[in-house]
């Protein structure tokens, strides 16, 4: 799948602007070459998808690091031929610590970020959030959109998070032969 996306260039040489660090838990392959498909929790969780999020575990790269942005590969299904924008529905982002305690929550309409003719890696700014150790970024698509899922090179750091039970469930899928494959959500954490 070829992705069209928002270009994010960072060259702060000679600038007083701090360099942002992008944390990835996918293979790191260029998105245009990645074996990626699109997924919505509504596909497997039905009505319960409202409370199930795609979760990625990260570790802060240095003491004093602050999360400032979440990047999500996603799409709301906009069709450029008909020019019909999908009905507005909310997604939800949560940041949780290593013990899954809630640190930050925000919601917004998927159309404000993901109305493009193809999937994009979209940056969503959040207030600077100081973090330590491991933390989770959880994106609840709520059936309003689809999220990028890398189908190979599973790192073991992608999960489903069930907000009703508080359970983290490894993100893996079985094929027709019952072979289980770990996947990576294309969700990134950005900070300084």
Image: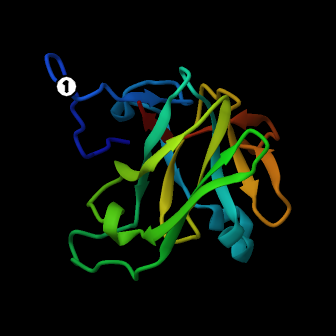
Could you tell me if residue 132 is visible in this image?
Answer: yes
Q: Which residue is at 65% across, 38% downward?
A: 135
x and y, in percent, of residue 159 in the image: 71, 44
| Of the pair 83 and 7, the residue shown nearer to us | 7
Could you tell me if residue 120 is visible in this image?
Answer: no
In this rendering, is residue 88 above or below 120?
A: below
Find disc 1 in the rendering and name its residue. 16
Q: Which residue is at 34% across, 34% downward?
A: 32
x and y, in percent, of residue 89 in the image: 47, 78
Extreme residue in the left direction: 14
In this rendering, is residue 55 above or below 53?
A: above
Q: Which residue is at 50% across, 68% downward?
A: 107
Q: Which quadrant of the rendered structure holds the C terminus? A: top left
Left or right: residue 148 compared with residue 169? left
In this rendering, is residue 49 above or below 66?
A: below
Q: In this figure, which colouring scheme has been used for the structure? A: rainbow
x and y, in percent, of residue 115 in the image: 30, 65
């Amino acid at each position: 799948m070829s992705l069209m996306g928002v270009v994010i260039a960072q060259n702060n040489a000679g600038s007083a602007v701090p360099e942002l660090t992008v944390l990835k838990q996918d293979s790191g392959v260029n998105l245009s070459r990645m074996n990626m498909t699109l997924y919505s929790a509504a596909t497997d969780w039905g009505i319960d998808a409202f409370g199930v999020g795609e979760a990625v575990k990260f570790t802060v790269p240095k003491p004093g690091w602050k999360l400032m942005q979440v990047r999500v590969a996603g799409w709301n299904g906009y069709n450029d031929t008909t020019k019909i924008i999908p009905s507005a529905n909310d997604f939800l982002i949560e940041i949780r610590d290593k013990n899954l305690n809630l640190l930050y929550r925000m919601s917004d309409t998927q159309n404000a970020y993901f109305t493009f003719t193809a999937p994009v890696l979209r940056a969503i700014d959040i207030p600077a959030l100081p973090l330590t150790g491991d933390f989770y970024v959880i994106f609840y698509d709520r059936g309003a959109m689809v999220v990028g899922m890398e189908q190979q090179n599973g790192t073991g750091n992608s999960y489903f998070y069930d907000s009703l039970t508080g359970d983290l469930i490894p993100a893996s899928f079985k094929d027709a032969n019952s072979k289980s494959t770990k996947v990576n959500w294309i969700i990134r954490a950005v900070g300084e």
